[in-house]
Amino acid sequence: MKILIATHKSYQIPDEAGYYPIMVGADLRNQIPVGYLKDNTGQNISKMNPFYNELTALYWAKYNLQDEDIIGLVHYRRYLGSKSGHDLNNILSAAQIREALNKVDVLLPKQRNYYIESQKNHYLNAHKNEPYFVMADVIKEKFPTYYEAFIAMGQSKQAHLFNMSIMNQENFQSYTSFMFDVLAEVEQRIPYREYEGQEQRVFGFLSERLMDTWLYTEQKTFAEYPIITTEKTNWVDKGTQFLKRKFFKNGRKKVHF
């Protein structure tokens, strides 16, 4: 079992068996903390980290951790836990993960509910619109069996976000093959290298809409868990930014903070 902790800097790491910090974009970093895995060994897309975010760790795992029974990805600031809060002692243990995966296919963070807008509209309000519509075209043209689930995801007010999940090797290969194949085709159709600011992270944002698309098409069972965060969220600011994105279309957009 390897649960990768995606990070771009040295950070507090939980002392829990099965969890391994991995420096994403390692090819672009001057220093790698001792004991951290790197996403630039073997087959990798480490140099694409500015555009793919934590997905460079998933890509590395797909091709370099094929002997592991269980693969997962969490963030240096976010973990799946037995209860929400800020205490790293409450993150899922290796024993809890194995027990849960004996009952369901995938372990996920609790769905994010946007209440007043759909997932499609939330994305369009927060990001450049072209990539979303291009991805819809790619799925319809190249992956038609997933298109119905993609449309349903877009119409839903709920989604599993953050690109965080834990699953067995077979499901991991299925999910990542679908996700990276879709994104590779989108990559050919949009001018992502011309994007600026947070919009550069386009493939990381798009991929968040592919988990549920894969999950429901493949009819995978799942269990949801609260998120343990190492840093407190400013919900007033987060809520304000959400409303600004929705009602003031031309305002400066702030998404992940």
Image: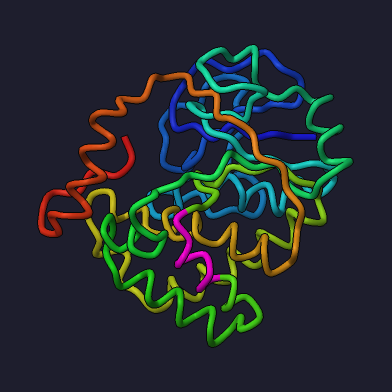
Q: Is residue 153 magenta?
A: yes
The image shows residue 156 at horizontal and vertical percentages of: 48, 61
User: Which residue is at the front of the view, 166 or 68?
Assistant: 166
The image shows residue 161 at horizontal and vertical percentages of: 50, 47
Please tell me in which quadrant of the rendered image residue 223 appears: top right
Please tell me in which quadrant of the rendered image residue 239 appears: top left
Name above or below for residue 110 compared with residue 198.
Answer: above
Question: Residue at coordinates 79% horizontally, 25% vertically from top-left?
Answer: 94
The image shows residue 166 at horizontal and vertical percentages of: 70, 42
| Quarter of the picture holding the C terminus | top left
- The span shown in magenta is 150-157
Relative side of 174 to 192, left or right: right
Question: Residue at coordinates 51% horizontally, 67% vertically from top-left?
Answer: 183
User: Which residue is at the front of the view, 243 or 61?
Assistant: 243
Name above or below for residue 54 compared with residue 229.
Answer: below
Relative side of 120 to 178, left or right: left
Identify the residue at the far bottom of this view.
Answer: 141
Identify the residue at the far front of this view.
Answer: 116
Question: Residue at coordinates 30% horizontally, 73% vertically from top-left?
Answer: 130
Q: How is the image coloured?
A: rainbow
| Quarter of the picture holding the N terminus | top right
User: Which residue is at the front of the view, 237 or 52?
Assistant: 237
Name above or below for residue 67 compared with residue 85.
Answer: below
Q: Is residue 247 magenta?
A: no
Question: Residue at coordinates 80% horizontally, 26% vertically from top-left?
Answer: 96
Relative side of 171 to 41, left or right: right
Relative side of 185 to 237, left or right: right
Query: Dominant secondary structure of the magenta stretch?
Result: helix
